[in-house]
Image (cartoon, grey):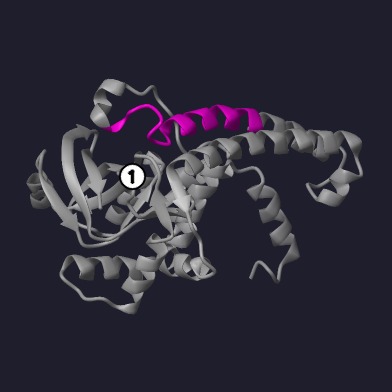
Amino acid sequence: MIIDNPITSRVLANFAQTLTSQDKVRLMELVDNDLNLSHYPQEWQKIIRGESVRKHGTHDQKTHGSWATSGNSYDEIDAQNEIINAEWRKKYRELDNYLTSKGMTHSWKEIEADPKAKKMRAEVDAIDAKRQANTNKFYEEHFEKNETEDFARLRTKYVVADTPTLKMNQQLREGGGLTQRVKDADALCAMGVVKERVGVYRGAILPQTMVDSLKVGTSFVDKGFQSTDVLKSSAKFYAEVRQDDGAKGIKVLFRMTLDKGLNAVDVGYGEIAVQRNATMTVTNKSKSGDFTIIDVEVTK
């Protein structure tokens, strides 16, 4: 539909350039899961206005326990990027106002022909590169990625086909066997290895009885693959979406420390897919609003 309508395509392309990386992550979550945006009017309006969909408060390290050691999670990078995001928006709006005053669009051809617009666009791009460099450094320090030519196909099968992946994990946790989909997910996770201990998040809706059974000191093997996120906001949002879709239980946010040597691969949009049959050890439990927070160590 978009391909057949060049005007719509141009409008969407210009709008996409006003979004920060994290706004794009949220938007992609809505699209990838085929959700009705009308269910999320407040979030959608924030995106339309070009606002951040997340607001950072101050972090009390005392509440984080052993999970949040310096540099082992994306939180610090995320906070730095929020500052860069504000600078990026300011420069982008200055560029946008200038182009509007000249009756120009954001097309590269028009910008290249105007020295002032070209300079302003370069400033915007430099800020975006700074933000991306922050993110790249984090991934390079914590994850080794060994992609094969099959990566794109396997990633699409695992990430985009969300419902079959959920069913596969449910079957594995119920004792299901080795299917082709499982073999493909194994191959995908094998393309990544944790280089240094790193903290990630996972949002879920679980029965109260299961949450009660996860006592501090408890260890168990998760027979399924785990989809985790470097962003706490995205993990919490996923749990809320699952609840809106009818999942029964209480909202849980796992703060997971992935051990060095664990197979875990970056599949894009902040998601880290973790190998099946990982050992989970509960190290702390707490409450934050309507979420139960469970800290776990994850090892091979």
Decide whether the magenta segment is chiefly helix, strand or loop: helix
- The residue at 26%/59% (across/down) is 246
- The residue at 21%/71% (across/down) is 171
Q: Could you say where residue 77 lies in the image, as x and y percent from the top left?
A: 48, 32
Counting the numbered discs, the total is 1
The magenta segment is 67-88
- The answer to whether any part of residue 39 appears in the image is no
What is the quadrant of the N terminus in the image? Answer: bottom right
Q: Could you say where residue 117 lies in the image, as x and y percent from the top left?
A: 84, 37
- The answer to whether any part of residue 222 appears in the image is yes
The image shows residue 103, relative to residue 155, as above or below, that is above
- The residue at 25%/25% (across/down) is 63
Queried whether the magenta region covers residue 205, the answer comes back as: no
Q: Is residue 5 left or right of residue 139?
A: right
Queried whether the magenta region covers residue 81, the answer comes back as: yes
Q: Could you say where residue 159 lies in the image, as x and y percent from the top left?
A: 43, 63
Identify the residue position indicated by label 1 in the image. Answer: 260
Q: Quadrant of residue 283?
A: top left
Q: Is residue 35 left or right of residue 175?
A: right
Q: Is residue 99 left or right of residue 10?
A: right
> Dot 1 lies on which element?
loop
Badge 1 amino acid: Lys
Disc 1: CA contacts within 10 A as few (<14), some (14-19) or many (>=20)? some
Q: Quadrant of residue 58?
A: top left
Q: Nearer the viewer, residue 300 or 183?
A: 300
Q: Could you say where residue 25 lies in the image, as x and y percent from the top left?
A: 50, 49
Q: Nearer the viewer, residue 110 or 254?
A: 254
